[in-house]
Image (cartoon, rainbow, N blue to C red):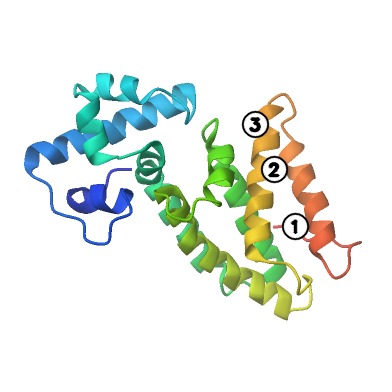
Amino acid sequence: MATSTAGTAAGTAAGTSAPRPMRADARRNYERLLTEARAVFAEHGTDASLEEIARRSGVGIGTLYRHFPNRHAMMSAVFQEALADLLERSRALAGAEQPCGALVEWLRALIAHAGEYRGLARALMSASAEKGSALAACSVPLRAAGERLLARAQESGAVRTDVSIGDLMQLTNAIALAAEESPEDGQLADRLLTLTLRGLKTDPTAVPSA
């Protein structure tokens, strides 16, 4: 998920408004840290040891913290590609013939993202209350994208007008967390989303399929 913007990504991940270009050696350290963070998060979840990530990257913990001042900053950088994919998906769905179906498809994509790494759903839920964190900042473009899809579904008359995108994003994280804690039930997330949709629709007897 490291991109051509790696030279400025450290500042972005830390939530600063004026990222500085990195020297070549600093860029290499940054990219190694991201690579190992993905591997360690995949193996041990997002609560994994930052010291282990630094060790695997061949750098000291001080170097890790210079690039990523806290865990949320590192997680934000790791998930930039997934964020870009979700935003692209929202743009592709923006003109869908069935606005409610488009919203449902996007919510399923959010649940899949939140469930990609153990602990991510819980971190996303807690980050929503930490407005200054890098991980919370990641949700800003997602909320805007989701609001557009939700507005179309509401304008079509399929979804209640008192539903907010903030509520929906919290619900998707909660569904992903429930599915994470019951891995033996592979259909739990879909069942919970279906139940949620029944509460969202103006006609609770009809639930759209993506």
In this rendering, the label closer to the viewer, 3 or 1:
3
Residue 156 drawn at (x, y percent): 74, 79
* Amino acid type, label 3: Glu
Residue located 21% across and 61% down the image: 18
Establish if 88 lies above or below 117: below
Q: Residue at x 44, y 54 (%)?
A: 138
On-image quarter of the C terminus: bottom right
Kindly tell me whether residue 150 is visible in this rendering: yes
Q: Nearer the viewer, residue 62 or 32?
A: 62
Q: Are marks 2 and 3 in contact (CB under 8 Å)?
A: no
Q: x, y (%) of residue 195?
A: 82, 50
Marks 2,1: beta carbons within 8 A: no
Q: Of the numbered discs in the image, which one, if any, rests on residue 180?
A: 3
- Asked if the residue under mark 1 is in contact with the one under mark 3, i.e. CB atoms within 8 Å, the reply is no
Which disc, if any, is residue 175? 2
Q: Earlier in the sequence, mark 2 or mark 3?
A: 2
Question: Does 163 sit left or right of 151 as displayed?
Answer: right
Crowding near pointer 1: few (<14 within 10 Å), some, many (20+)?
A: few
| Amino acid type, residue under disc 2 in the picture | Ile
Q: Quadrant of residue 55?
A: top left
Label 3 – label 1 distance at C-alpha: 23 Å
Mark 3 or mark 1, earlier in chain: 3
Q: Judge whether residue 98 can be spotted in this image.
A: no
Indicate whether 84 appears above or below 144: above
User: Label 1 belongs to which residue?
Assistant: 209
